[in-house]
Image (cartoon, helix red, strand yellow):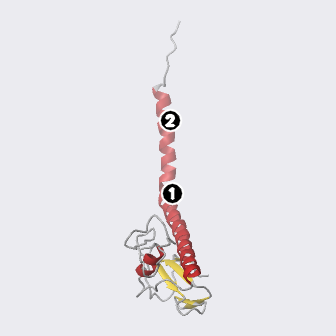
Amino acid sequence: MKKKQDGFTLIELLVVMAIIAILAAILVPLAPKLIGTAKRNKAKGEVNTIAMAVKSYYSDYGRMPPAPAGGNSLNTIKALIANDTVANPRETVYLELETSNITGEFLDPWGRQYELFLDDDYDNKVTFDGGSYRTTCIAVSRGPNGATVGSPTTDSDDITTAK
């Protein structure tokens, strides 16, 4: 009479390891594409959140937050995260996201500062990359290639609230 043994045989273990290796070989080439898609989706959500924060600030104060100086949106972001008591005396937090910090830096998923274009003259038009849009705020991430302000046109990888 044979004894029954508990556990896996060597063949069973090798078959399981081979299946795991095949699945890993299929999934590894997809990882960069999935990461890129996740970063683009995160940036889309964050530009929409920034635009809504500016609109909420405008709704509360009846004026736009401090305008970005020379393409740098640091002053605007400081007002939105309640780190500028002159521009935001009520210290209302309009923007609270994981990548904002006390200095007001607010970086996109590729590590670059978001850009803001505001309706400073209150005519409900914002000029952005050579176009005029009927809105009060446009938030922009220049995407993976990081084309900067002043480029002749919007790159296809730019993520923006301009419509």
Q: Secondary structure at mark 2?
A: helix
Q: Which residue is mark 2?
A: 16
Residue occupying the point 41% across, 87% down: 69
Q: Residues within 10 Å of mark 1 (few under 14, many from 20)?
A: few
Badge 2 or badge 1: first in the primary sequence: 2
Where in the figure is residue 4, as x and y percent of width and height?
Answer: 52, 14
- At horizontal 62% and vertical 88% (from top left) the residue drawn is 134
Q: Residue type at mark 1: give it.
A: Leu
- Please state which of residues 110 and 71 is positioned toward the viewer in this rendering: 71
> In the orientation shown, which residue stands out farthest toward the front?
90
| Tag shown at residue 153 | none
Give whichever of 71, 82 is nearer the camera.
82
Q: Is residue 120 above or below residue 51?
A: below
Residue 144 point in image, percent of width and height: 45, 72
Q: Is residue 83 above or below residue 62?
A: above
The correct choice, above or below, for 29 with respect to 103 in the image is: above
The disc labelled 2 sits on which kind of residue?
Val
Quarter of the figure with residue 124: bottom right
Query: Which of the two residues, 8 or 70, is positioned nearer the viewer here?
Result: 70
Where is residue 126 shown, x and y percent of the image?
Answer: 56, 89
Q: Which residue is mark 1?
A: 30
x%, y% of residue 91? Answer: 47, 73
